């Protein structure tokens, strides 16, 4: 475990520290700019775009070698990958707009064809000069072994630009993601904003290729945003939470992979992000599975409590075991189902409030208030004391309530 | 379109003397469209529609399902491309009059689980005025708050939009349009699937807009309320069927023309104004 804490504290050597910082920066940029991809429900487009980078890498390598340069020049490879990714993106857009193909079919076609071309080019490269192609396959699943300071700078600068652009353009992008028709009616160019969203995603994809690889980069774009959604109801906050989650996953994942000899960085980062996602899915307040279950249980308990008390008011026996248990736990009935002192008070109250609700619905026919009648919300939460007094006045003097 | 007060227009006639009648000049409408055609393939959804919608009046766009009612609105706004046709807002091309139009899309057109609050949605109506890089000014915030108040939703400002009833969602959409402070309001089925209280609240707001001299145009599906809510009707079934004041245009004959056999004759008698006179 000490190797992990070393890695987390950036004490595991220069390369490991560089990788951890680079992964954190990339995670932040991917999480933040992936937010609108998720909100626009176009996650899979980014997968196609990522796969469409491969032929660009191959072509750029061949060109640079052909021109007598170093085929592994990072900027050259990134420009090449961006070029074919952009072509792939436009191809998807064109197919959806001009043919009867749906977006998922267009995504599948572009992803498969571009990736296929890329793999062919990689094979061609392998038959070219020996040795020089080393490292190109690393773009598939990422590689950290040879990460240079220059690579970290590319991630830092490119990532900062992507996050800055995301924040500056958040209003139009939110508008298009929420209600594209309304945005168009207001005069926004929806197509350009969509291209901006995908352009930002593409930029992050390209700078992240070397570290995470093109196959897994989509996970870093989408998982943080999906996870962040469990923790906020505001799209602005979503950007920063997704960024923070992405950065944390990147950092912890890189540290984990540095702490053992044979752990691949990109996949470990994705697995860390997936763990955070699973935790959020289960335990987030409000949207989490556990919270929903708890809410349902509480609701069920309230329904049973009300039914039980109303049954007792009508002097019916309680037949459901759960209801009886519930009322006993609250000390409202004895084991044989006979109400206790407090139980009788509660029964009287619920029977009286039912009557009050009957009056309330007559008095407030046209207001939204009576729409809140569900038999479970206490009447005191809906009406003011003087309104309830008025219901009581109409109800007449206290009489025996309940019974038949 | 052009006023004929200058020179008398030359008569246009065929060789055998068939004359084209000169068009009566119309007063400048809040929204006038001419020859609007929308087509997804070679079958038009809206064909060569002319219409004009005056300020200070409420117009219902009615017609059977698939008649192109919503499509017409979207084409006017440029949400979907027009194959042909021109759109003028108070005599100006729409590109220069975006700030004068407010659109209320169908409620079902968006994902209500979107992470945003009621107030956020209303403030979306102010995006154009705020600009990209500045914060919302106090005056604009107040306007958003007032718009919510006008639809009776001020208490819900901070609520996530998914936790609203259908009627409340429709009110939020209306508040967003109100925040725009527009001259022309285009609404797509504002009463679809809302509760009675919301329907009344929306009608009240629209009546106030009308009284303030705004033009209100709504795609409407409930023929029973056309007479009560609207001043004018525009009937469409791909082509324009009829257009004019409710009293003279909302007739059994026109309804028959727009809806064909889809409305039973007894219905027509109940609905149409002319028969009630």
Image: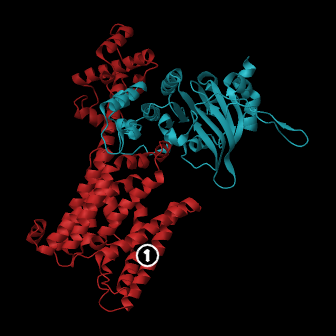
Q: Position of residue B67 (x, y in %)?
A: 66, 42
User: Would you identify the image quadrant in which residue B243 lies?
Assistant: top right
Give the camera-side residue of B96 and A275: B96
State the hue of chain B. cyan
Residue A370 in percent (x, y) is at 41, 23
Residue A285 image offset from top left, x and y in percent:
26, 45
Residue at the front extreme?
B7
> Does residue A73 sit above or below B101 in this rendering?
below
Mark 1: few/some/many CA within 10 Å (<14, 14-19, 20+): many
* Res A258 quadrant in image: bottom left
Which residue was labeled with disc 1? A115
Q: Front-most of A87 and A328?
A: A87
| Identity of the residue drawn at 34% across and 7% down | A397
**Residue in view at x 26 percent, y 20 percent:** A345
Rendered residue at 33%/81% (across/down): A137
Residue B75 shows in the view = yes
Q: Quadrant of the C terminus of chain B?
A: top right
Q: How is the image coloured?
A: by chain
Chain of the residue on which disc 1 is drawn = A
Identify the element where label 1 is drawn.
helix
Query: Chain drawn red, letter?
Result: A
Instruction: Report the front residue among A195 and A396.
Output: A195
Q: Quadrant of the N terminus of chain B?
A: top right
Q: Quadrant of residue A206?
A: bottom left
């Amino acid at each position: 475990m000490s190797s992990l804490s070393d890695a987390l504290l950036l004490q595991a050597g220069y390369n490991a520290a560089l990788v951890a910082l680079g992964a954190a920066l990339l995670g932040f940029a991917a999480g933040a700019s992936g937010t609108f991809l998720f909100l626009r429900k176009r996650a899979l487009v980014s997968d196609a775009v990522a796969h469409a980078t491969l032929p660009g890498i191959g072509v750029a390598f061949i060109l640079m070698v052909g021109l007598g340069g170093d085929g592994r020049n990072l900027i050259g490879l990134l420009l090449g990958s961006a070029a074919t990714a952009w072509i792939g993106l436009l191809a998807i857009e064109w197919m959806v707009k001009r043919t009867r193909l749906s977006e998922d079919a267009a995504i599948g076609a572009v992803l498969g064809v571009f990736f296929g071309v890329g793999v062919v080019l990689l094979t061609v490269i392998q038959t070219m000069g020996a040795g020089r192609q080393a490292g190109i396959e690393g773009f598939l699943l990422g590689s950290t072994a040879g990460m240079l300071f220059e690579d970290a700078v590319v991630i830092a600068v490119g990532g900062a630009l992507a996050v800055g652009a995301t924040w500056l353009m958040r209003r139009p992008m939110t508008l298009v993601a929420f209600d594209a028709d309304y945005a168009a009616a207001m005069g926004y160019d929806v197509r350009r904003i969509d291209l901006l969203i995908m352009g930002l995603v593409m930029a992050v994809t390209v700078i992240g290729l070397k570290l995470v690889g093109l196959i897994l980069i989509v996970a870093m774009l989408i998982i943080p945003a999906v996870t962040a959604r469990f923790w906020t109801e505001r799209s602005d906050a979503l950007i920063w939470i997704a960024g923070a989650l992405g950065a944390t996953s990147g950092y912890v994942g890189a540290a984990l992979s540095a702490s053992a000899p044979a752990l691949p960085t990109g996949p470990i980062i994705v697995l860390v992000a997936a763990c955070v996602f699973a935790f959020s899915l289960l335990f987030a307040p409000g949207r989490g599975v556990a919270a929903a279950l708890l809410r349902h249980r509480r609701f069920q308990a309230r329904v049973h409590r009300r039914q039980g008390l109303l049954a007792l008011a009508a002097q019916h026996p309680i037949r459901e075991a759960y209801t009886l248990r519930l009322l006993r736990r609250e000390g409202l009935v004895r084991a044989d189902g006979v109400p206790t002192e407090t139980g009788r008070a509660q029964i009287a109250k619920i029977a009286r409030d039912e009557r009050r609700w009957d009056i309330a619905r007559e008095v407030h026919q046209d207001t939204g208030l009576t729409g809140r009648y569900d038999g479970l919300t206490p009447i005191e939460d809906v009406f003011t004391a003087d309104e309830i007094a008025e219901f009581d006045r109409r109800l007449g003097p206290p009489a025996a309530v309940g019974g038949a | 379109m052009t006023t004929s007060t200058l020179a008398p227009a030359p008569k246009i006639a065929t060789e055998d003397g068939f004359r084209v009648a000169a068009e009566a000049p119309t007063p400048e409408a809040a929204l006038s469209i001419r020859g609007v055609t929308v087509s997804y393939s070679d079958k038009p959804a809206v064909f060569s529609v002319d219409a004009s919608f005056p300020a200070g009046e409420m117009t219902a766009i009615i017609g059977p399902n698939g008649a192109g009612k919503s499509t017409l609105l979207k084409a006017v706004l440029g949400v979907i491309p027009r194959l042909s046709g021109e759109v003028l807002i108070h005599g100006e091309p729409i590109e220069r009059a975006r700030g004068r139009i407010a659109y209320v899309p169908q409620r079902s057109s968006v994902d209500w689980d979107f992470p945003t609050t009621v107030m956020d949605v209303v403030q979306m109506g102010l995006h154009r005025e705020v600009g990209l890089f500045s914060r919302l000014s106090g005056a604009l915030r107040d306007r958003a708050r007032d718009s919510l108040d006008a639809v009776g939703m001020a208490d819900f400002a901070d609520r996530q939009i998914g936790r609203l009833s259908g009627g409340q969602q429709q009110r939020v959409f209306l508040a967003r349009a109100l925040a725009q402070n527009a001259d022309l309001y285009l609404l797509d089925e504002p009463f679809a699937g809302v509760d009675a209280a919301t329907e009344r609240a929306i009608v009240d707001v629209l009546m106030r807009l009308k009284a303030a001299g705004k033009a209100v145009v709504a795609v409407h599906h409930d023929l029973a309320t056309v007479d009560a809510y609207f001043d004018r009707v525009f009937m469409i079934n791909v082509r324009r069927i009829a257009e004019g004041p409710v009293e003279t245009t909302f007739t059994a004959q026109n309804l028959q023309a727009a809806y064909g056999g889809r409305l039973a004759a007894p219905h027509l008698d109940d609905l149409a104004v002319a028969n009630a006179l």
